[in-house]
Amino acid sequence: MLHRFLRGCLSYSVSKRRRKYGGVTALVSGRHFRVWSPCSFPDSVNLTATVVQDQTPLRVAVMSAAAPGTSKAAHSDVAPKRKKGPGALATAYLVIYNVVMTAGWLVIAVGLVRAYLARGSYHGLYYSIEKPLKFFQTGAILEILHCAVGIVPSSVVLTGFQVMSRVFLTWAVTHSVREVQSEDSVLLFVTAWTVTEIIRYSFYTFSLLNHLPFLIKWARYTFFFVLYPMGVTGELLTIYAALPYVQKTGLYSVTLPNKYNFSFDYYTFLILIMISYIPLFPQLYFHMIRQRKKVLGHVEDYSKVE
């Protein structure tokens, strides 16, 4: 009798077009839940509630037929889709890549410290880490490929700009204009890059392994306050120091006349690169600040309450 009574109470039929319902309240495992139906239905659409009896307390399964175009939205409200991460093979590759890059930048850091202790001066330390710096900074180009093929959910354009700007400074400025290699500004951006990359690749590695220490997360979204301005300052000063030598030698410049009827002034190009830092750096810097609030904001709010 109870089964028939409940089934009769929970059976509904909607026969009029655009009849509005506020929802159906069902008792599920001892709790009341409101299952919202569409605001309007076409003709001959039924909203049926079915009683399921088993060994556990009474459960109610509510099945609704929504109007065309609303079923996807209703399904997403009930069970939102999770973002798919990289597959097992891609994850294994990314872990190996990030471990190798972390180790590479650690080699650069150790090289800087050893050279400083041996010489007793920070002048000319670039020569002690020149080869590993070129190798591992160039290896970061693979990050653009990772974004392009979709195994890393980041912007190809933003990643490409960040990576290629460093590769450009490594090869097209510091390597090509040997006179600037002894400048203190080179050590400034190399130090900033080294600390940043050790933290960043460690962050990626532990995130992929689902064992991210809070200290690394905190460092990832805190150290940039100092490291980003420090790196940008060193990069700009290095480019500025290279300008006289580029203008004097005509490095990478193409003058008219030539058979291609094309000219290129590398000196002017470097000046434009320096000017581009004005709009681009604040965007990246404030983006990281927003990310920090999103990732660490709740932790800081909780500590204030405590």
Image: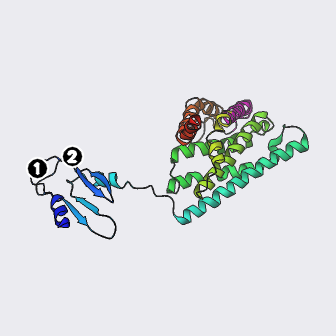
As drawn, the label of residue 22 is 2
Q: Residues within 10 Å of mark 2 (few under 14, many from 20)?
A: few
Residue, disc 1: 17
User: Disc 2 on helix, strand or loop?
Assistant: loop
161 to 237, vertically: above or below: below
Residue that sits furthest to the front in the current view: 1
Residue kind at label 1, given as amino acid type: Arg
287 displayed left or right of 47: right
Quadrant housing residue 239 = top right
Can the viewer see residue 176 in this picture? no
The magenta span reads 230-251
Q: Crowding near pointer 1: few (<14 within 10 Å), some, many (20+)?
A: few
Q: Secondary structure at mark 1?
A: loop
Question: Is residue 146 one of those drawn in magenta?
Answer: no
Residue at the spot x=64%, y=61% of the render?
96
Residue 48 on image: x %, y %: 19, 60
Residue shown at 72%/45% (left/top)?
Answer: 194
In percent of width and height, residue 186 lies at 75, 37
Cβ–Cβ under 8 Å for marks 2 and 1: no
Q: Which amino acid, by three-letter code, is at mark 2? A: Gly
294 or 57: nearer the viewer: 57
